[in-house]
Amino acid sequence: MSRRKTRPTRKSPAPAAPAVTADSPCPCGLDATYGACCGRFHSGTAGTAPTAELLMRSRYSAFVVRDEAYLLRTWAPETRPGEVDFDPALRWTGLEILTATDGTAFHQHGTVTFAAGYVHGGETGAMRERSRFARHEGAWVYVDGDVGE
Ligand SMILES: [Zn+2]
């Protein structure tokens, strides 16, 4: 996690990451608890996500719970940033998978197009992206994406 060295000085500090427990509904929207869905990939207890779509979902959930280590290890080495900047004023509110191509056990590449809802400073919005995924050492990783397609 990228920790702040100093606390914000404004009167109403930005809310911390929402408390998601193993028994919470999974942030990714599937009908399962976090622990049985994306949480098992974050903790590594279920290995790695078997499809690009499940990786996409687990990365969305990692943004919700601010699991920087998971985001970095599921990022292709050639596009991986040094760190993940979580905007403390931004809260993700839901994920909708629009389309997915390839990205199964039989593929080396895949794309997932999604819309992710958010609230930022009291304003609601949605981000739409077509993400590209590939296999790295056998596991699905995020390569890059086109925002707004
Ligand atoms: Zn999930």
Image (cartoon, rainbow, N blue to C red):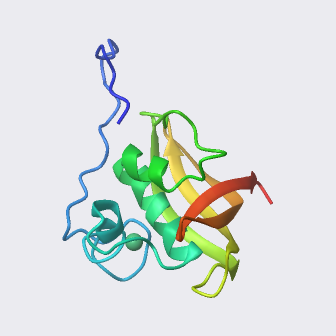
- Residue 100 in the image: state x and y as whole percent: 68, 78
Q: Is residue 117 above or below residue 2?
A: below
Q: Is residue 16 above or below residue 13?
A: below
Q: Is residue 10 above or below residue 61?
A: above
Q: Residue at x 35, y 67 (%)?
A: 41
- Residue 28 in the image: state x and y as whole percent: 44, 69
- Residue 141 in the image: state x and y as whole percent: 57, 61
Task: For the C terminus, give its image quadrant.
Answer: bottom right
Q: Residue at x 58, y 73 (%)?
A: 52
- Corner quadrant of residue 39: bottom left
Q: Nearer the viewer, residue 41 or 121?
A: 41
- Corner quadrant of residue 36: bottom left
Q: Nearer the viewer, residue 36 or 82?
A: 82
Residue 93 horizontal side relative to residue 107, left or right: left
Q: Residue at x 29, y 72 (%)?
A: 25
- Corner quadrant of residue 113: bottom right
